[in-house]
Image (cartoon, grey):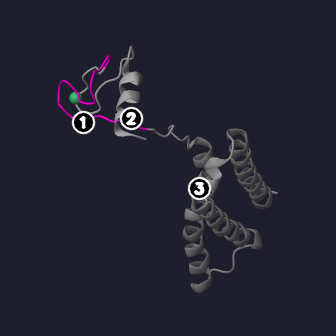
Amino acid sequence: MEPSESVDLLLEFLRERDVPCPVCGYNLRNLTRSQCPECRKELVLAVGLRKPRFGWFLATITPGLFAGIAAPLLLIPLIGEMVLGGGVAPWFIWATDAFGWFSGLAALVIVRFRYPFLRQPQPTQRTWAAVAWGIHLAAFALLMVLIFA
Ligand SMILES: [Zn+2]
């Protein structure tokens, strides 16, 4: 595109439209040349990105990140108790710890593939979040049953 063409598009865009100068905030409505009348900065018309929405992405990785942080913290007393002769914790405590490591790893994999994740439609992202929370709540409920039953 010719430079004069893009200036024409800029001026056309600002005709009858209130847009503040990105530098000084001066209203550029009905601008007549590609320069801010207030701060004298050269102006161009540009394409921006719509603000991406991270809500479902964060909701999906949150339980995994918490489990991933808890897993090594749980492992320390489990091993400590064995070493100090306090006995071996029941299998489902070990299984819970293994689940935590796996869950944290899964969350990191989702973080690694965040761009493909964020490209999915919102309902699909919501489903991922629901699955992530469903798995963790089910695991927690199962653990409670094994501990107290
Ligand atoms: Zn300005």
Q: Furthest residue to the right? A: 149
The residues tagged by marks 1 and 2 sit, at their Cα atoms, a distance apart of 13 Å
The answer to which quarter of the image holds residue 86 is bottom right
Q: Is the magenta stretch mostly helix, strand or loop?
A: loop
Which of the marked residues, 1 or 2, is nearer the chain's N terminus?
A: 2
The residues tagged by marks 2 and 3 sit, at their Cα atoms, a distance apart of 35 Å
Look at the picture and state if 106 lies above or below 24: below
Where on the image, by quarter, is ligand 1?
top left
What is the secondary structure assignment of the residue under circle 3?
Answer: helix
What is the secondary structure assignment of the residue under circle 2?
Answer: helix
Q: In which quarter of the image is the N terminus?
A: top left
Q: Position of residue 7 (x, y in %)?
A: 34, 31
- Does the beta carbon at disc 1 come under 8 Å from ligand 1? no
Q: Position of residue 46 (x, y in %)?
A: 41, 37
Q: In this view, does 114 lie to the left or right of 21?
A: right
Q: Position of residue 129 (x, y in %)?
A: 68, 47
Residues at circles 1 and 2 in contact by the CB criterion of under 8 Å: no
**Residue at coordinates 40% horizontally, 22% vertically from top-left?**
12
Please state which amino acid type lies under the numbered disc 1.
Glu
Please state which amino acid type lies under the numbered disc 3.
Arg
Q: In this view, does 147 lie to the left or right of 85?
A: right
Look at the picture and state if 93 lies above or below 111: below
Which of the marked residues, 1 or 3, is nearer the chain's N terminus?
A: 1
- Stretch of the chain drawn in magenta: 29-46
Give the labeled residue for mark 1.
42
Q: Crowdedness of circle 2 by 10 Å Cα count: few (<14), some, many (20+)?
A: some
The residues tagged by marks 1 and 3 sit, at their Cα atoms, a distance apart of 36 Å
Q: Furthest residue to the top? A: 16
- Does the beta carbon at disc 3 come under 8 Å from ligand 1? no
Nearest the eye: 38 or 87? 38
- Does the beta carbon at disc 2 come under 8 Å from ligand 1? no
